[in-house]
Image: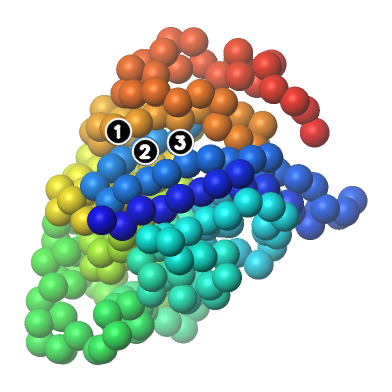
Amino acid sequence: MATLEIHDLHVSVEADNGPQEILRGVNLTVKQGETHAIMGPNGSGKSTLAYSLAGHPKYTVTGGTVTLDGENVLEMSVDERARAGVFLAMQYPVEVPGVSVSNFLRTSATAIRGEAPKLRLWVKEVKAAMERLSIDPVFAERNVNEGFSGGEKKRHEILQLELLRPKIAVLDETDSGLDVDALRVVSDGVNRVRESGEVGTLLITHYTRILRYIKPDFVHVFAHGRIAESGGAELADKLENEGYEAYVKGGATS
Ligand SMILES: Nc1ncnc2c1ncn2[C@@H]1O[C@H](COP(=O)(O)OP(=O)(O)O)[C@@H](O)[C@H]1O
Ligand SMILES: [Mg+2]
């Protein structure tokens, strides 16, 4: 079974006034089939963790290890990570002018599966996935994320998730900016992928709202660049009632 292991991860970002340490010793193990919610206040480093796992060049790992099935993820390039089965749904998906959704998906699937999917089957597969996510078929010919609304971008991220079937899915604030209907569609998509039992999910969220639809096995509170507390789904209820104040006050400041 695939396992992502993050051990004592320290990450700095190059800011205008020099390097700033953002992650200060993250420890987390995510196994295939498990769903971990990472919750925490704004600025606590949740997106930094997501980007660091995906290999964003702006984030420098200054200590610790990340392995997927014992393989050193930190030594892999961004596309090697994707091929190894690490998937990131970004908090702010980027526009890719000149590249259609259809081309983008097929190119990604080809890279990850190691061969181009048979065209006829692929067209069917994409069509069905788009239907399940209530994405209008015309989106296939639109440029990736260009002029998409917030909700359309998030649906497109989940479309990739469904088609690429990663081992570890990092979903960064996939719920932000969604109305209730879109939230349900997106959550259903995540749940379909989870039900396969083949994906370990890192569900990063600021709000407990999405946890009504996607039930986490574990909840972790992120504060000041590390996990301040871990528990089961009941921890999310506590956060719903009490907020993050105790964690914000408690930790070190930068
Ligand atoms: N590229 C960057 N340049 C400068 N500061 C950054 C950059 N990325 C993140 N930070 C800082 O790191 C901290 C954590 O940010 P982030 O990981 O986005 O938090 P979260 O996702 O939990 O809201 C914030 O103080 C943020 O300003
Ligand atoms: Mg964030």
Percent of width and height locating residue 251: 69, 22
Mark 2: secondary structure: strand
- In percent of the image, x 57 and y 70: which residue is there? 75
Check disc 1 and report its element: helix, strand or loop.
loop
Earlier-in-chain disc, 2 versus 1: 2
The type of residue carrying mark 2 is His
Q: Residues within 10 Å of mark 2 (few under 14, many from 20)?
A: many
Residue pictured at 24% horizontal, 47% vertical:
33
Q: Is residue 119 visible?
A: yes
The N terminus sits in image quarter:
bottom left
Do the numbered discs 2 and 3 sit on residues whose CB atoms are within 8 Å?
Answer: yes
Under circle 3, the secondary element is strand
Residue at horizontal 75 percent and vertical 25 percent from the top: 252
Whole-number angstrom distance, CA of label 3 to CA of label 1: 10 Å
For disc 1, the neighbor class at 10 Å (few under 14, some 14 to 19, many from 20) is many
Residue 38 got which mark? 3
- Residue that label 1 marks: 216
Q: Nearer the viewer, residue 215 or 184?
A: 215
Residue at numbered disc 2: 36
Q: Is residue 212 above or below residue 76?
A: above
Give how far apart the Cα atoms at labels 2 and 1 are.
6 Å
